[in-house]
Amino acid sequence: MKTNKTGRLGFDRTGPRSPEVLTDAETIVFPVVDDAPASAVTTAPMPRVPERLPQRRPFEPFASSGPPAPALERAPAGLPVRARHAKARPALPGAPAADGGYTPTRRRTVVSRIALLAILVLQAVLTLRLRNTAFEDEALYLYAGRMEIAHLLHGAALQGSYASYFSGAPVLYPVLGAALNMVGGLALARALSLAEMLAVTAMLYSVARFMFNERVALCSAALFAVSESALFVGHLATYDATCLFLLAAAATIAVRTSAYRWPVFLLAAPLAALAVAVKYAGALYVPTICCLPALAGWPVRGRRVLWYPLAFGVVVAALLWAGLHLGGHAYLEAITSTTTNRAQGTTSDGLILRESVAWGGLLTVLAAIGAVAYARRPRTEPGELIGPPGQRARRVLLGIVLSGTMFLAPLYQMHLHTDVSLQKHIGFGMFFAAPLAGVGLVRIVGDHFRRPHLGIALWSAALALGISQSWSLYHDWPSSGPFVSALSPYLSRNASYLVEVPEVPIYYLEGLPGAQPGQFSSTYDIAYTDSQGQVLTGNAGFSAAVRAGAFKVIAYTDTVTPAADNAIQQAIEESRGYKLVKVVHLTDANGPLDYYVWLKRTPPPHPARARR
């Protein structure tokens, strides 16, 4: 049998040859009649020959890793034989999907979700190991929420205008947390935060999986789940977990719907606005969410995504303006005093920088490595299944936006010269930078898991830091049980108390007639009116109030407000109107401390002695 030089039927003089792998766009024409003249042979484009063919024995069929070659169809006599292909083929596992992501195999999906479940279980276990009594912010928000519920349902009077100084709307999280607290106590209120932080980790996995792949998504979730912020905030009944949950939900919707034809991503705008209402500092991360639909949808939608950030920002701004108009002047005052024009602190920039590096430095470095590596080469290994990377400009902007979000909280707190809540706020940036940190960890491990020991070492370091830091932060305040027990016997109606952290005894002693919020004063500040009608503040106000016997009980530790505590102690010694009835020995993360409880003498001292 002779073979025409221009056609490759698969046989030669020495034996059978391997058929070439055909593409959908190629058709090869073969002659049917032997010894046909060269002029009667129809030539077709030659298929591209692979640079390398796998080694095989003679006459061994070629084992293709792709789809099976189409069968050749015998045409009637005198007509050529053509390789016919189906008009439409289902998408191959791992091929780019129509929504901009990719379609993984069922086995890969199942395995990755089992791994994600293991990560979430580890996060829950590490979070629940943290145990302590209520932090002062928890006590304040939960008690204020109970007051707001009583006000909304029964018209009861509020103990002050919470809306004028809270850092979030008091009718949102405090009401929700207080409702859970009334059902299941502090444990149930904290359980809400744990559920929200577990959901944040799951949404982080979803975002990273959509934009990259399962391998990156699992590394991102594993790094975030063991961070100190995820563990600490996950067991704290404050605004932070709810705010981050809403921001993460908005980011997930914005990314997952970015390739849709219609602007479905705008459904994330109400969630972003609600996150800002829950905690005003959440507005710091809204610009990042505004950019996500454009960055995620760029490879699929092209230049049509350029208007997405502006549209998203306008909708969020309109919703916030409507909420502020509904809330009134008190909310604007609170936003100004707690967020936009907060009083400057005295913490040095160096201390804020050191704390930021300690709490988020490892993830930040991995995110920077991931941003640079992804901009240079989107895939870790040739042929890796990954979400559409788009052009290099898009990858560079994605790296800048996501990794740069990590620096927002430290820079903002450097501007305010305070590290208050930095350990919580830094976790917000971690959520946005974690996908690139996952890319960085994958690149360090290398293609085909070339260096797994480096990945294990880095994640182990993150785990050790998260465990130790979260435990230390969670024990930064002493257990208040012994102090509350020591204070409770001296409560009485119409009496006043000067307590260093009054929110905690107010929360635990709720329901007792002698423990109403209006009876407590804090050592943070005071406005005392003396017998001449003069209003005294600061240390002068504390000294005058103590000398006049204005408080039945005075309690302080000389650690939280040392300047005020020294003034109070000096006034007690000079007036001799109080006696030390209890020294409560407590311990926090920094070591032992003592709570001094002073009781007003009965009968009170002579007025002349008090003025001396």
Image (cartoon, grey):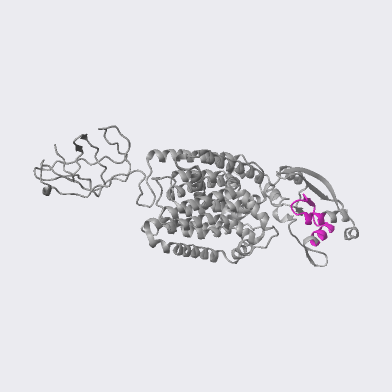
**Residue 199 visible, this angle:** no
Q: Residue at x 60, y 44 (%)?
A: 466
Q: Residue at x 25, y 42 (%)?
A: 20
Q: Compared with residue 71, is residue 239 higher up or lower down, i.e. above or below?
A: below
- Per the rendered image, the range of residues in magenta is 540-568
- x, y percent for residue 177: 58, 50
Is 420 left, or right, of 491 in this rendering? left
Q: Is 439 in front, or is 239?
A: 439
Total tally of numbered discs in the picture: 0
- x, y percent for residue 394: 44, 58
Q: Is residue 468 magenta?
A: no
Q: Quadrant of the N terminus?
A: top left
Q: Quadrant of the C terminus?
A: bottom right
Q: Is 331 in front, or is 149?
A: 331
- x, y percent for residue 447: 45, 42
The answer to which quarter of the image holds residue 157 is bottom right
